[in-house]
Image (cartoon, grey):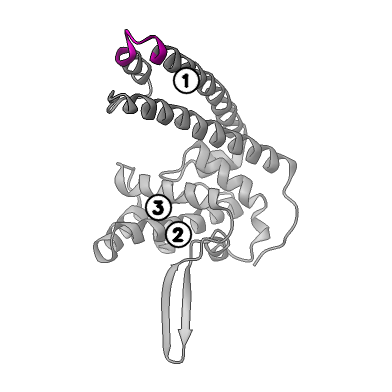
Amino acid sequence: MQQRDCKSLPAQETRALLTARKLLQTKRLDVEMSLRGVLRGFGLKVGPTTARSFPGRARELVAGHPTLTAVAEALLAARETLGEQLRGLEKRLRDRAREDGRARLLMTAPGVGVVVALTFVAAVDDPARFRSSKAVGAHFGLTPRRYQSGETDVAGRISKIGDAGVRTMLYEAANVILTKPVKGSALKSWAARLAARAGMRKAKVALARKLAVVLHRMLADGTPFAAGRAAATA
C-alpha cells in the first residue's frame, strides 16, 4: 500500500504536540469527573456546567464543608494547571498550523480545523508514500472488512487498522460537516443522502473515508479544496 519509511522530524514533532495535547485534555476531564464523583457520593450533584462555570458550581456545593472544600480546591487547582498547560500547547499547534502551508491548505476543506489538519499532515507526511488517494482510507482503517465464502460476499464493520488518532479526527470532521452549517459542500450533500438510506453513523464513517481521499489529493496536488472535485470523488 505504501512505503514503510520513517516520518520526517517535523511530522514527529507535530505528533508529539498532538499526543501531549490529547493527554492533558484527557487528564483534565478525568480530574473534573473525579470531583463530580466525590461530590455525588455526598449527595451533591454538579449538574450541567460549562468549562468556565464548573469551578464556581463546585465551590458553591462544598461551601461550609471544610473537608470537601479542601478536596475540591486541590482538584480544581490541578484542573486549572492542566488547563493552563493545555492552552499553551494549543497555541503552539495554532502557530504551527499557521506556518505550515500544507495544514493551511487542508483547512480550506469544510470541517477541517487546526487539529484535524495537523493530525492528517503528520500522519501522511509524504503523499507519495501512497500509491493512490483511495489507498488512504484503507490505511487508516476506514474501509469495511469483507467476509467471503462461496457465493457470499458481505461487507462488515470498518477494519480499524492503522492510526486511531487520524481515524478519530476524520470522523470528527465528518460529524462537523454533517451536523453543523458549512459553506456549500458537495460532500455534505452526498453524505446526507447516504444518511437517509443507511443511517447517520454509516454516513459519517463513509464521509470520513471520502474526506481522507480528498485531503490526500489536496496534499498531492498542492491545491485547495474544490467543491466540484469533491463531488466527483464522492
Tell which circle, 2 or 3, labels the residue nearer the N-terminal end. Answer: 2
Q: Secondary structure at mark 3?
A: helix
Relative image position of residue 41 (x, y in whole percent): 33, 28
Q: Nearer the viewer, mark 2 or mark 1?
A: 1
Mark 3, other Cα within 10 Å: few <14 / some 14–19 / many ≥20 = some
Q: The C terminus lies in which quarter of the figure?
A: bottom left
Q: Give the amino acid at mark 2.
A: Lys
Tell which circle, 2 or 1, labels the residue nearer the N-terminal end. Answer: 1
Q: Give the amino acid at mark 1.
A: Leu
Q: What residue does disc 3 label?
A: 227
Q: Relative to residue 58, is residue 21 depicted above or below?
A: below
Give the number of the disc on residue 90. Answer: none
Tell which circle, 1 or 3, labels the residue nearer the N-terminal end. Answer: 1
Q: Relative to residue 172, is residue 39 depicted above or below?
A: above
- Do tag 2 and tag 3 residues touch (Cβ < 8 Å)? no
Q: CA distance from mark 1 to mark 3?
A: 47 Å
Q: Nearer the viewer, mark 1 or mark 3?
A: 1
Q: CA distance from mark 2 to mark 3?
A: 13 Å
Q: What residue does disc 2 label?
A: 210
Give the number of the disc on residue 75. Answer: 1
Region rendered in magenta: 60-68
| 234 horizontally vs 212: left or right | left
Q: Nearer the viewer, residue 10 or 150?
A: 150
| 98 horizontally vs 48: left or right | right
Q: Nearer the viewer, residue 206 or 24?
A: 24
